[in-house]
Amino acid sequence: MTNASSRLPSSHPHDELVEAIRDALAAHADPERAVGQQRYMKSSLPYLGLTSPTLRQALRPVLASSAYRIAERGRWEATVRALWDEATHREHWYAALALLGHRAYRGWRDPATLPLVEHLVRTGRWWDVVDDLATHRVRELLLDRPDEIAPVLREWAHEEDLWIRRTAILAQVGAKDRTDRALLTDVIEPSIADPDFFARKAIGWALRDYARTDPDWVREFVAARPRLSPLSRREALKHL
């Protein structure tokens, strides 16, 4: 797949919505909390200091307002990108994810959205945003259009980029009995030997989640792969 960062939207962002979101978040800023949040997340972007409930509370009326409703798909994507690419605080990233996943735009979340999601993963490069994208946006696309999305995830599983591989591994978390076991195997295998904590943790998480649906399959998968790291193995079998 073409690197998503090179595929820029043709439409202009909804500048009034971007400004309204930034103003709503700034109104709830807590500079003291922000220092600890940035330190904990090891983030190069500073925080405004909003808790998750406060963030949702601040965004809800803005995103639901008919005054800021986006009527054209390209403009929606451009607005997500503007919030993300021009972010001055990490909460702007979280707002971009909220706009991307808002129910008003469900009809536009189809395989054509994947380059945008890929751009966010490649530039976000940390677990708070990547895991949200993997377990919500990518999973949604995969379950809706498996024939189109599964081949992309198999490609991603062989990428050098750790966060793209992590996204492929985690894309079926929460899929339960709709999990494609062959795909799960194919996205895990290329990262089994990766010593990175985030690769090993992702493998364990994906297997642990599916173990709630088919524990015998997970036991057999783990037993057949002695090269699984102790971390991946421990996480996979945690509740078995």
Image (cartoon, rainbow, N blue to C red):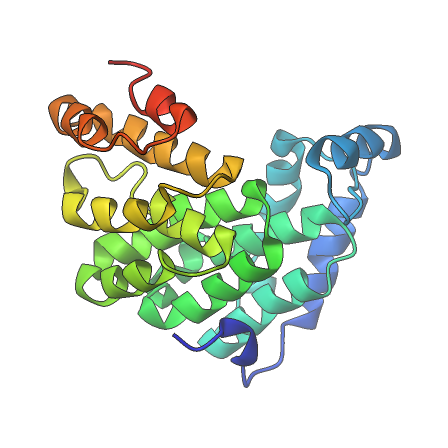
Q: Residue at x 38, y 29 (%)?
A: 232
Q: Residue at x 72, y 58 (%)?
A: 20
Q: Nearer the viewer, residue 122 or 142?
A: 122
Asked if residue 72 can be seen in this view, the reply is no
Q: Position of residue 48 (x, y in %)?
A: 79, 41
Q: Position of residue 109 (x, y in %)?
A: 37, 63
> Is 7 rendered above or below residue 50?
below
Query: What is the quadrant of residue 22 in the picture?
Result: bottom right
Q: Nearer the viewer, residue 16 or 175?
A: 175
Specify the quadrant that holds the N terminus: bottom left
Q: Nearer the viewer, residue 85 or 226?
A: 226
Horizontal relation, residue 131 to residue 224: left or right: right
Horizontal relation, residue 32 to residue 240: left or right: right
Residue extending farthest right:
32
Q: Residue at x 69, y 54 (%)?
A: 21
How many labels were placed on the picture? 0
Asked if residue 47 can be seen in this view, the reply is yes
Horizontal relation, residue 176 to residue 13: left or right: left
Q: Position of residue 99 (x, y in %)?
A: 53, 56
> Is 49 rendered above or below residue 151?
above
> Is 113 rendered above or below residue 47?
below
Horizontal relation, residue 220 to residue 210: left or right: left
Q: Residue at x 70, y 68 (%)?
A: 16
Specify the quadrant that holds the C terminus: top left
Q: Position of residue 220 (x, y in %)?
A: 14, 27
Residue extending farthest bottom:
10
Q: Nearer the viewer, residue 12 or 128?
A: 128
Residue extending farthest front:
226
